[in-house]
Amino acid sequence: MSWTLQAIKGALEGVFPSTLATTGRDGTVNLVFVSQVHHVDDDHVAFSEQFLKRTLDNLIANPRAQAFVVDPTTARQFRVDLAYVRRETEGPTVTRMRAKLEGIARATGMADVFALRAAVVCRVTGIRPVGVSAAPGPERARPTRVPAARHLGDVADAIASAEDLAELTETLLGALSDRLGYRHAALWLLDDASSSLLAVGSRGFPESGIGGEIALGDSLVGQCAATRVPIRISALSRERTYARAARAGARDIAPPGLPDAESFLAVPLVAKRRALGVLVVESRTRLAFDEEDEATLRLVAHLAGASIALLHGGGEAPTDAPIRVRIYEEDDSVFVDDEYVVKGTAGRLLGVMLALARERGRFELTNRELRLDPRSKLSPLNDNLEARLLLLRRRLEERSPRLRVTSVGRGRLRLELDADFTVERIPSGGA
Amino acid sequence: MDLAVPDWIFHNDVLVLAATADSTGALEITRSIGARRTGADRIRIYLPVPESLHFLNLAADLGRVSIVCGRPRDYRSIQLKAEGARPVATTAEDAAAVARYRAELGPALEGAGIPSEIWDQLISREVVTVEARLSSSWEQTPGANAGTRLDGGAG
């Protein structure tokens, strides 16, 4: 039998510690435990680059590697032969890995220690079952939970029938439990004013936790909203400190959650690329949720997000909420409404445009003006300005629906803002 | 050479894995049924067979192994590098150490949130004892000291 990544996906969930071996230029073997083996696609996996400096050096010198993983649902272990492909610092793989890792890290007060620098992407060249586990093991894996279309239809009906947010919350959580079998669930909504998430409904927890609050970016729920990507964990008891820390760090009301949860899945509610909230389900069973659950809940969350946007009048941010721009001077990285947009020269150029808009009320300007402004710090020889501006425009289109840069003719630009704006500059070495 | 190797890595709540490579760069990782220090610079690991046979073949080329010892309950981990790895006869002391490890690791894993019931199915009953000469030890616990050499040698 030829094994595939899809067939061993349970072994990549991190329930049982995995290891990764590489060799250096001199042939010395390096073996490390790895916190995540991320399933990128049918042929690739990625490892989080946290403490893997020697491993990465080795992979660059000699791209061959091997991972050793264990599937706790079938008691099979596998050797996964690998070939190093690349190191990624941004993109969907990094975003998903970072959301999970930093969610746990922030909840445990370890954000400085567990910061994900990059994803180390490897191609799978072979998968071999190990020894006794090559024989069929006990089949403990639960059947994949693919919901019947009629049950999904019932959930969609429940969402569509709600006339206000309270009714939507109740019908959504009820339908999740009754029609899809998610008996422990909570709905969190983003409060723009405080940049935090509030628990507005829950079902199946010892305490409702309604009114519980988590700052955007904090813990797993906050990371899910901040990054707008699902976060799935299959063995929370291995991260038990996460749960304890999450409770210790809560505000006045303990957030909804199972104290002995093993599986956790959070999916963002998104409308017009803006996070509106987070839908969370938990289970006391390890490996209770897989990618099918994730897909099901993404669908439900998108429906709920669209419905909430309609109930709120189109899902736009309140028109009186100023657009918040934060610029880190150390590397000119720019965040708009807490969403990372761009850094480097493109970020610096946006800062100059915003400064000109604030200082002179100028929202239209020419490339020449940007070149001449000393704050742009462009090279007099080859500034590559057009490419930088194209990058900036694209990134704003993707990440910042309320702030745009458009072209209004050859060499002319317009800064378009849907509301007033504030700019906070963080000096080098600042928080 | 008396390496700075903490005692806890030889306790029975620690996962032990070993890796080796031959002169062509072919790699193999295998699980060890515990580890035991048998001298100032000597370590014995217990490799299940038949699943470690390829490992043993590769190790026979250069004799270099890397051993990681990780304690799941607090993520502490150490990497040991060793040379001159070779199979040796399993003594009564070795057999007793392996038996204790087999019996005690499962409950220790459960305490760390790892399903213990699969432990017995992960390993064969037969082991080959491999002895090697320790050459360096490295901190691997996640954190600022990860990658630090423990025995004071050049990193």
Image (cartoon, coloured by chain):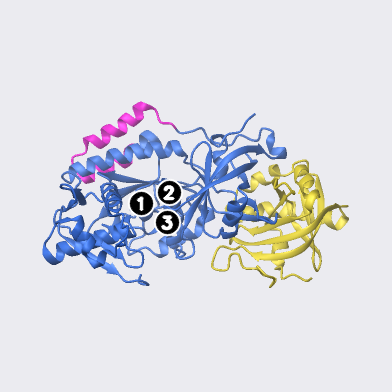
Q: Amino acid type of disc 1?
A: Thr
Label 3: which residue? A103
Label 1: which residue? A227
Asked if residue B82 lies left or right of residue A213, the reply is right
Chain letter, disc 1 residue: A
- Position of residue A80 relative to residue A260, above or below, is above
Of A73 and A186, nearer the camera is A73
Instruction: State which region is magenta.
Output: A146-175
What residue do we see at 14% from left, 67% from top?
A: A359
Q: Residue furthest front?
A: A381
Image location (x, y in percent) of residue A187 = 32, 48
Asked if residue B88 lies left or right of residue B4, the reply is right
Label 2: which residue? A96
Asked whether residue A194 is in view, the answer is no
SS for dot 1: helix
Q: CA distance from mark 1 to mark 2?
A: 8 Å
Q: CA distance from mark 2 to mark 3?
A: 11 Å
Front tag of 1 and 3? 1
Instruction: Give me the chain that's blue.
Output: A
Q: Are marks 1 and 2 in contact (CB under 8 Å)?
A: yes
> Both on one chain, marks 1 and 2?
yes
Image location (x, y in percent) of residue A353 = 20, 60
Prevalent SS, magenta region: helix
Whether residue A156 is in magenta: the answer is yes
Q: Amino acid type of disc 2?
A: Arg
Front tag of 2 and 3? 2
